[in-house]
Image (cartoon, rainbow, N blue to C red):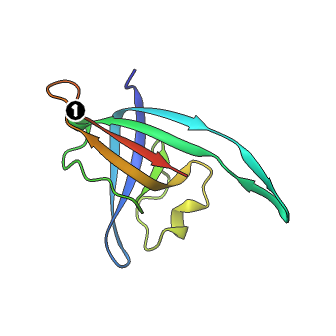
Amino acid sequence: MFTQTVTIYHKVEDNKWLTRVVNDAHVEKIEGETIRKHGVESSSKLIAYIPLTSINDGVVEKGDIIYDGISPVTAINKANDILYHKDAFLVTSAENFDFGDGQKHIVVVAR
């Protein structure tokens, strides 16, 4: 079940992002569009389940960026350096579930 890889960009300060490749995650992508008065807007989102054993420091926060797979961009200075990719999503929530051995994980929702 946890067989996928994601890349996480965590903002540590202005123009400084920490890039991590995380293995053994589970990713669900939901693709969609919303029709607005002035055109079509993407309503796609990504939900990632990341075991705490897969991520050393366990830090994923709102405003971080998650990329489905290994990102071709290794370093960024601002969010727009990566968000133009179709597999890059802005994290809107990250919740830590500390259920005990073997079940500890983070659920990341991104748009």
Q: Nearer the viewer, residue 62 or 7?
A: 62
Residue drawn at x 43%, y 74% is: 77
**Image height of 65 relative to 52, above or below:** below
Residue 66 in percent (x, y) is at: 45, 51
Q: Position of residue 61 (x, y in %)?
A: 34, 57
Quadrant (top left, top right, bottom left, bottom right) of the N terminus? top left
Q: Please determine whether, in this image, residue 109 is positioned above or below residue 37.
A: above
Residue 102 place in picture, x, y as percent: 19, 24
Measured along the vertical axis of the image, is residue 58 above or below residue 82?
above
Q: Amino acid at mark 1?
A: Lys
Question: Which residue, as the protein is rendered here, is positioned at the far top?
Answer: 1
Marker count (numbered): 1
Q: Nearer the viewer, residue 7 or 91?
A: 91
Q: Which residue is mark 1?
A: 104
Along the line of sight, which residue is nearer the eye, 84 or 63?
63
Q: Residue at x 61, y 37 (%)?
A: 30
* Residue plotted at (61% across, 61% down): 84
Outermost residue, bottom side = 14
In the figure, 36 relative to 17: above or below? Answer: above
Indicate the position of residue 60 as horizontal and vertical percent values.
32, 53
